[in-house]
Image (cartoon, rainbow, N blue to C red):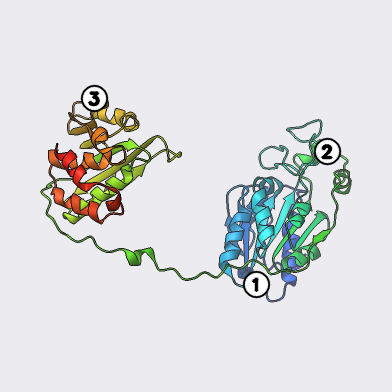
Amino acid sequence: MCDRHFLSSEPLHFCGGCGHHLIARNTEKALQRVTDLRPLDVILVTDIGCHGIIDRSFLTHTIHGLHGRSIALAAGISAGLDAPGKKVIVFIGDGGATIGLQHLIEAAHRNFNMTVVIHNNMLYGMTGGQSSGLTPCGYKTKAFPEGQPYVGYDLCRKANNVGAAYARRVIGTGDFSGYLEEAITTPGFSLVEVVEVCPSYGAKRNPDRTLTEIVKQAGLKVQLYSHPPRESYSRPKRTPVASLLDHNTAIPLTHASTLANPRSLSINGSAGEGVQSAAGIFARAAIAAGLHVTKKESYPVTVGVGFSTSELILSPDPILYTGIPAPDVVIITSQDGLERSGVTIGRMKRGLVLIDESLDAPETAARVVQRNFRGQAGPRSATLVALFHYLGVDPIFPTNSLTNAVQQSKLSGKLNLERMMATSCA
């Protein structure tokens, strides 16, 4: 072999007889023939699989990703690189290619400027020789010792169907560097599927079968699938948008707080009943009173049903830890909120539980206060009314600060503030 420019001089670490050796060496030959291409002009992306141990051998940039994700990583690199003199190459196995099949389809469809080289040894060589999505029908593997009963994917045809500029299947013997060179120099998305045999698993279970015979019996064509050249992917131009930080304005200090030590609140209700909005308004009111505040939200993946919880920490000093092992105050406005906070309330040794009177008072060592939030203010305003009630029980900052925060919020036109104030004072 000619002197290596892109591969180190160390021996490759694949099993003896593995076709991965040939892919690496043919890639070296192909890259050498690409004019003005230097090792650091190449970004090689690999993932989990025997092929992935090539990282240490290539003198190019190398990135090693999760199983089946190397094409997705390469697409992101290609989209962000925007440098015609650079080349993104993906090495991926047949298992990874089928695990990440949608990534392959999208990359080909969008015509990302990259070359994908599939090491198709027709099985999972790293994990014991199980079948992959490219295992041909009849090919014997650990999973199907009598022969794979299903037809494998034809990735070249799939890539071609969605518009790949270049897709070619080759038999992994001899010198196929010319095909790799064609793919590497093709603008846009190109794919080379190299069919090979795993000496540790494939050859032992399928003796005396040649690669050409296996490919032919599988009905796969050793040929080029191509389309006329088209513009490779480029990031669409977007109208500049002002930073969200530009619109952040400091909350003016309008009131004074009497709080001497941090206070933690756990506010619990039902999804869709304004728990998070009310907690946000309360946080703004606390900041206007000179307090530092943190806010955490929690709700189930369904978002529109079930519980909704907001955790607030209020402190006269900067807050360095936002966890709440045991809250000082728990506010509950619905059955969902009670079920969510039941365990926490049971562990409380002190503090305050402010709960809607329609709910059963929980057993706890904390002080329990019940009020008719839902009945008097309705479900959508229950949490905000409960927070007004809380300031009446524990006046850590003036009620007027919360009133102002409500008036400045997006909800101001939807709330009957006078009714809420009257209800909270009742």
Q: CA distance from mark 1 to mark 3?
A: 73 Å
Could you tell me residue 389's position as x and y percent? 18, 39
Residue 297, compared with residue 84, is above or below; it is above
Q: Position of residue 368 (x, y in %)?
A: 18, 29
Q: Earlier in the sequence, mark 1 or mark 3?
A: 1
- Residue located beneath label 3 in the image: 361
Quick one: which residue is furthest to the bottom in this view? 36
Q: Residue at x 64, y 52 (%)?
A: 103
Q: CA distance from mark 2 to mark 1?
A: 41 Å
Q: Nearer the viewer, residue 360 or 115?
A: 360
Q: Which residue is mark 1?
A: 38
The percent coordinates of residue 309 (x first, y second) are 33, 39
Alpha carbon separation for disc pair 2 and 3: 71 Å
Residue where numbered disc 2 is placed? 206
Q: Are marks 2 and 3 in contact (CB under 8 Å)?
A: no
Q: Nearer the viewer, mark 1 or mark 3?
A: 3
Provide the secondary structure element on which disc 3 rests: loop
Residue contact at pointers 2 and 1, CB within 8 angstroms = no
Q: Residues within 10 Å of mark 3 (few under 14, many from 20)?
A: some
Q: Are marks 1 and 3 in contact (CB under 8 Å)?
A: no
- The local secondary structure at tag 1 comes to loop
